[in-house]
Image (cartoon, helix red, strand yellow):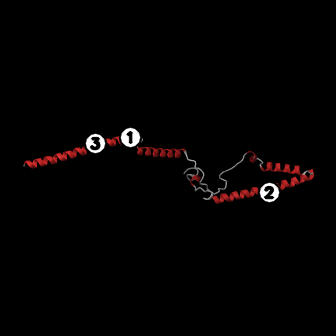
Amino acid sequence: MPKGGKKGGHKGRMRTYTSPEEIDAQMKAEKERKKQEQEQEELEEGGAAQNETAELKLPASGSDDSDDENSQRRRAGVEGLIEIENPNRMAQKSKKVTQIELDEPKQLSRREREEIEKQKAKERYMKMHLAGKTDQAKADLARLAIIRKQREDAAKKKEEEKKAAASRGMNSLSLK
């Protein structure tokens, strides 16, 4: 038996995944916590701003300074430098069928466009072919005309042979 005890260790255990409900609950709790922190900061800043305005007796300049300080304090630390947006943490918004717009032109991929063009080209060629305007259609029609003429000649030849055979048969009867 190896030193570590059982083979494999932790790697064979079942994996656990966070359910969507748990993620939603975590996000709601995080939003509530942020709101409470902001409210506390505003209360603290509001009290400090009132004290400053009372000392300076200039309400307009004191309120402008407090607005600038609020925005700076809210984005203190790394948040002021980097905007972090995790797409996995965002709440997924489901769209209803009535909200989806079907009128928008659908963007086709290159392969789909080429496939459609190929089908249209094939249809155009078949129309031209049926009308007898393509080289292949002209060659087919010429071949068909030659075959028809050969068949007509063969049919005439058979009829002549039948007539000749019938006339020989009468001649042979008359001789007997």
Residue 39: which disc? Answer: 2
With 58 as the anchor, is 88 left or right in this view? left
Please determine whether, in this image, residue 112 is positioned above or below residue 16.
above
Residue lying at 82% horizontally and 48% vertically, measured from the top left: 68
Q: CA distance from mark 1 to mark 3?
A: 19 Å
With 91 as the anchor, is 61 left or right in this view? right
With 127 as the anchor, is 43 left or right in this view? right
Tell me where residue 142 appears, x and y as whole percent.
35, 40
Camera-side mark, 3 or 2: 3
Q: CA distance from mark 2 to mark 1?
A: 87 Å
Of the pair 6 and 133, the residue shown nearer to us: 133
Residue occupied by mark 1: 138
Secondary structure of the residue carrying numbered label 2:
helix
* Amino acid under disc 1: Lys
Residue 61: which disc? Answer: none
Secondary structure of the residue carrying numbered label 1:
helix
In the figure, residue 153 lies in which quadrant?
Answer: top left
Residue occupied by mark 3: 150
Of the pair 131 and 41, the residue shown nearer to us: 131
Of the pair 133 and 15, the residue shown nearer to us: 133
Tell me where residue 23 appears, x and y as whole percent.
66, 57
Crowding at dot 1, Cα within 10 Å, few <14 / some 14-19 / many 20+, comes out as: some
* Amino acid under disc 3: Gln
Residue lying at 38% horizontally and 40% vertically, measured from the top left: 138
In the figure, residue 160 lies in which quadrant?
Answer: top left
